[in-house]
Amino acid sequence: MTREAETPEAPETPLIEIDRPAAGVALVRIDPGPEGLMDAAAADALAGAVTALDADPGVRAVVLTGAVPGMFVRHYSLIELGATAEKVAASGRRFNDLSRPVKPAPFNACLDRIQASPKPWIAALNGWAMGGGFELALACDLRVALDGPWKFGLPEVRAGLLPGGGGTQRLTRLLGEARALDFVLRGRIVSPADADRLGLLSALVPEGGDVTSTALALAADLAALPRLGLAHAKRLVRTALDGTLEQGLAAERTLFVDTLTDPDTRALVARMAADADGRIDDAALEAAAGTVQALGTASEDGAA
């Protein structure tokens, strides 16, 4: 097993472990303690891993899962949150002026880095993911979950809070306003099967199955694709609601043309055109898969 210390520039910490189970794929296991509670130290460690993996040309897709069976990340540490609340109260200030936003905490910054990464991140939900744990999963690009007795959700309103790690924003973009309002205002807690029915999952693994293997297979498929097109596609979808339709379409046109400057893309398009007389069919896609793998291997050799 490759420990995190062997990853370029990755900080040494027992909270994060990185393995390389397949070409182009990194497996990140987070272990925030026996209770599975996220805190600033775990967030900083994970953010360091994101930075290191972004800089590693040999990594094309990342799977994130919990190190403890039955536990992705249970939720954010209430002890740390309580200490923050006391400091905020002691300041005597109110924080309801949205023209003066609060700076991102380590947890916010970590999730923003995952979302902004040019590489796809897949959350392999192997157990409980509530509050901050669920927000961590929402920050990933895709989610695969193991069915079981655990729950996912954003119950913060039940404690007089609101989701503070991007839950209100990312869930709305995933589900739409009406369903996100129902989810957040009621502090809903759902089973993995319910999360799947809501459309939050790419796959639901039957109880007793191997969610990590399922996520790794998905990551391997993504890692086999030309990286520039994949990065641009992620960026466009992630920012689709940030501006007007016209702005989004202009960005799409621009980045589409940029993919044509990529040698891997040009080679792949030429191969598909030659094999299928310019048509895209099953045979052309199967042939392209082999071409993509060969291109990926050549690119990694060149980077090395």
Image (spheres, rainbow, N blue to C red):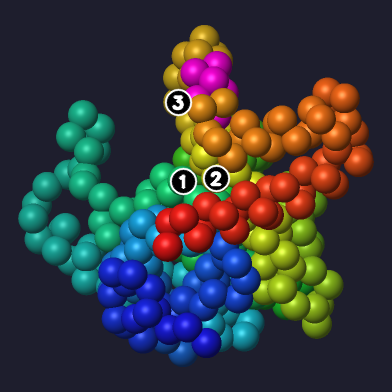
266 and 187: which is toward the camera: 266
For residue 201, what is the image quadrant? Answer: bottom right
Q: Is residue 154 visible?
A: no
Q: Earlier in the sequence, mark 3 or mark 2?
A: 2
User: How far across and down, in percent of the image, does residue 112 sit?
Assistant: 38, 49
Instruction: Tell me the element at label 3.
Output: loop
User: How far across and down, in percent of the image, does residue 211 sit?
Assistant: 71, 72
Rendered position, 107 above or below 33: above
> Which label belongs to residue 227?
2
How would you rate the neighbour count of disc 1 (Cα within 10 Å): few for under 14, some for 14-19, many for 20 or more? some
Instruction: Tell me the element at label 2.
Output: helix
| Amino acid identity at mark 3 | Asp
Give the alpha-carbon distance from disc 1 to disc 3, as whole Å: 18 Å
For residue 148, what is the image quadrant? Answer: bottom right
- What span is colored magenta in the figure? 252-259
Q: Where is mark 1, residue-wise?
A: 118
Residue at 43% of width from left, 56% of height from top?
Answer: 303
61 and 136: which is toward the camera: 61
> Which label belongs to residue 242?
3
| Amino acid identity at mark 2 | Arg
Residue at 21% of width from left, 47% of height from top?
Answer: 103
